[in-house]
Image: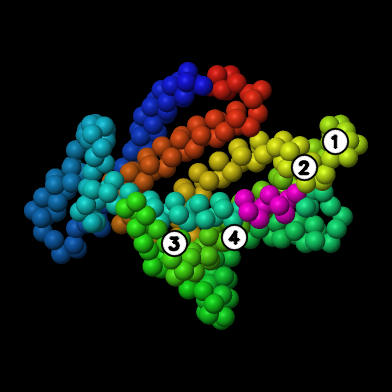
Amino acid sequence: MTVFIIRRLLQSVVLVLVMSVLVFLGVYAIGNPADTLIAPDATEAERIAIVEHFGLDKPLYAQYGKFLANALKGDMGNSFKFNEPALKLITERIPATLELAFAALFITVLLGIPLGLYAGFKPSALPSKIIMGVSAFGFSVPVFWLGLMMVMTFAVILGWLPASGRGKTVDLFGIPVSFLTWDGIQHMILPAINLSFFKLSLIIRLTRAGTQEVIRSDYIKYAKAKGLKSSRIILVHVLKNILIPITTILGLEFGRTIAFATVTETIFAWPGMGKLIIDSISTLDRPVIVAYLMMIVIMFIMINLIVDIIYSLLDPRVRLEERA
């Protein structure tokens, strides 16, 4: 396992370097932030001074070289809009995004696996058909439409839950969190459900398919013949075998949840990284955009590494060295 982790980390360094080039070129070759930074009535001398101050007059390779040298020191540059370190702006909003992503993952696991197991064991039952119908709806409905409908229904018409914001937070080990306050939980319910709906549908279908495949296996028939309790068959024999693909999908979907929470965070005004990146794109705030994308790349790499390790623990037949 040690050899695998070291090898994966070395591969990750190369991957991050390649992605930094692609991200930098992709972001810095599009648009001109000077158009948003400089007032329309600014003089030519003021325009030149601002362009030189932000280094926008230098060739692209020179800008990348400066970016890479500073990034190795932990400096992603200063935001054009906020005039603060881009990495600081990102890290200040990471807790809010991670909290929302973990809440969505919790809902997905808490509901998706049991509902999928039930639908797999009793595919002809009416509740199973309802479960699969809801999951089909979850695959087809756009996230932004579902979010708007939830706001309209539960916040505007019924007035049960707040429509926007993060609510009251308290510090946990110096990090502000909202899940420890009732006001924060109320603010989190709608965006967490909205963010988890597609993933919940995916896990329900994956669990159902895995369950139906496993229950036809000989060892399940043998376990039933031995007179084992249904709960033991489900927890020990069925769930353990279907958790392997589910873990892989959950790991990948968790990374996607963090990366693509922008729509949900924008609809519910959730103060996370997604809302920040939308605002930064609208003003062509290049340092923040690059810092955000690089942070997402690193998160995906770490999540994939953790998933591989968990995969090997669930199935000892898998050698991590063979998966490298």
Give the overall secondary structure of the magenta segment. helix
Which residue is depicted at the point 37% across and 63% down? 169
Q: Is residue 324 left or right of residue 22?
A: right
Q: Is residue 186 covered in magenta?
A: no
Question: Are the residues at dot 2 and dot 1 in contact (C-beta closer than 8 Å)?
Answer: yes
Position of 158 compared to 31: left or right?
right
Residue picked out by circle 3: 180
Secondary structure under tag 3 reads: loop
Label annotation for residue 133: none
Quadrant of the image occupied by residue 253 = top right
Q: Distance between the residues labelled 2 and 3?
A: 34 Å
Q: Residue 223 carries which label?
A: 1
Spatial distance from mark 2 to mark 4, Cα to Cα? 39 Å
Q: Where is mark 2, residue-wise? A: 232
Residue 60 in view, yes or no:
no
Q: Position of residue 240 (x, y in %)?
A: 70, 37
Q: Is residue 111 magenta?
A: yes
Q: Nearer the viewer, mark 4 or mark 3?
A: 3
Q: Which of marks 2 and 1 is nearer the N terminus?
A: 1
State which region is magenta: 109-117
Q: Where is residue 127 in the image (x, y as percent from the top left)?
A: 80, 61
Amino acid type, mark 2: Arg
Q: Quadrant of residue 65?
A: top left
